[in-house]
Amino acid sequence: MAAPLIAAVILREDGMIRSFGISMAAPLPLALPVLFIFTRKQRIRFSTAAGFLLVFLFWIIACFLGSLPFRLSGAMPRLVDAIFESVSGFSTTGISLFADVEILPRSLLLWRGMTHWLGGIGIVVLTVALLPLLGIGGFQLVKAETTGPEKEKITPKITATAKILCFLYLGLTILLTALLVLGGMSWFDAVFHAFSTIATGGFSSRNSSIAAYSSPFIEWVCIIFMILAGYNFALIYQLLRGKIRDVFRNSEGRAYISILGIAALITTLSLYSSGLDFATALRQAFFHCSSIASSCGLLVADHNLWPPLAQGILLLLMFVGGCSGSTAGGIKVVRWVVLFKQAQNEARRLLYPRGVFNIRLNRKVGRKDVVYGVAGFVFLYFATLAASFLLTTSGGLEPWDSLNAALICLGNIGLGLGKLNSGAAIAASPDYIKWGLSFFMIAGRLELWTIFVMLMPEYWRR
């Protein structure tokens, strides 16, 4: 919180100086155990079970501490609202309970954007890059936090992988900031929206999001970087290293671009047939399809006024998500690829009962345990979605709005249809709805397994 505190001092926001000062002092007691670990000689290694618990605690503590500036500044007098906003930021969901963000202190806005940026790269991945200083191994933490059915190392050492991802993440953020400034944004707005775009978050410093700028250049820049943010960061790194063949062989990457391209094309034709000129229809279609598919949540138009076909495309994209190894939320494209290939094999098995069929990912034979893991995850995702849907309907939301709320929070999308185009409907909901949706946002960010494995009685047995 040093950066927003410095901003508060420069901008002479006295109330925010006090709020950030207290918020920075609050975690000091939690630092004492870390100091104790640092002074010990022996190296510490985590088991998988311990990794799950530690990752969960990281996120709970971070979201609580991140809510303090909202609460102490008086911008959100109620703790449940402050925690919801913090969870929405760190989980990169991006649905906000603020009715008017433009009246907030600039330092608080900066912190609000930083929660996206820190949550996007993953608090745990950032921590893993620093854990060697404490003599602590980190791959079990990364396995519990990163997205996708398979956890890949870019380099043999997980700490080196974490550092490469951090530098790549930072580099993309700086590049996007520069391009947004070139497009006419102020430095503050450019930094804020770079945080939000690269993290696939959705928070904006403007009430009308990117639509406030009415700039085709800014919109196309955001489209490109939303697509990149929803892509696998490991593949982006390989592309920068010149390994183009490996990138094009990746099954998930090809499927992600294909799904996004087809969805945007159909949406463009739907908008064009409704009366929009082709250039505007193409730009708005690509922007909103990229925003939903990458779970970014930024917008340039009110898609609730679009034709039903275009809205239907956006709804389907909410079930897809981005690539594994990205900052995007949702089920992830690779899981749909695995299920599609397995469905093809089952159809072939009906024709050739004695045949032996395997799925192939990246032109290699996939393991059967990946198929089982994907099937289990998709079932768990839809079961959790049903639970979230029932929770929101119990608070008085209409079924359509409840489904949107469940998809937005579990998939960390932040942008929905109907009333859930903003957080007004959730802001008026009972407190237990906000607590429940906060839980589902964290569960979605941690890919469900990290949370639900700890609910099993076997986890707590010796």
Image (tube, rainbow, N blue to C red):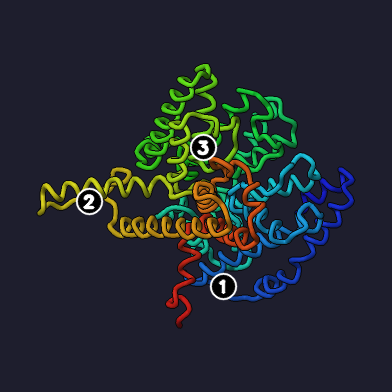
Foreground mark, 2 or 1? 2
Furthest-bottom residue in view? 462
Q: Of helix, strand and loop, which one carries label 2?
A: loop
Q: Which residue is mark 1?
A: 43
Q: Report x, y in % for residue 457.
A: 44, 77
Residues at badges 3 and 1 in contact (C-beta under 8 Å)? no
Q: Which picture quadrant has residue 262?
A: top left
Task: Write the residue at 65% across / 59% down.
Answer: 63
Task: Write the residue at 76% across / 39% down.
Answer: 102
- When the figure is inspected, residue 111 is found, relative to residue 26, above or below; the finding is above
* Amino acid type at image mark 2: Asn
Q: Which picture quadrant has residue 58?
A: bottom right
* Amino acid type at image mark 1: Arg
Q: Report x, y in % for residue 446.
A: 51, 58
Q: Which residue is mark 3?
A: 228
Q: Of helix, strand and loop, which one carries label 1?
A: loop
Q: Which residue is mark 2?
A: 358
Q: Report x, y in % for residue 238.
A: 45, 40
Quadrant in which the N terminus appears? bottom right
Q: CA distance from mark 3 to mark 2?
A: 30 Å
Left or right of 264, for residue 396: right
* Amino acid type at image mark 3: Leu
Crowding at label 2, few (<14), some or many (≥20) Cα neighbours within 10 Å?
few
Q: Of helix, strand and loop, which one carries label 3?
A: helix
Residues at badges 3 and 2 in contact (C-beta under 8 Å)? no
Q: CA distance from mark 2 to mark 1?
A: 42 Å
Q: Which picture quadrant has residue 113?
A: top right
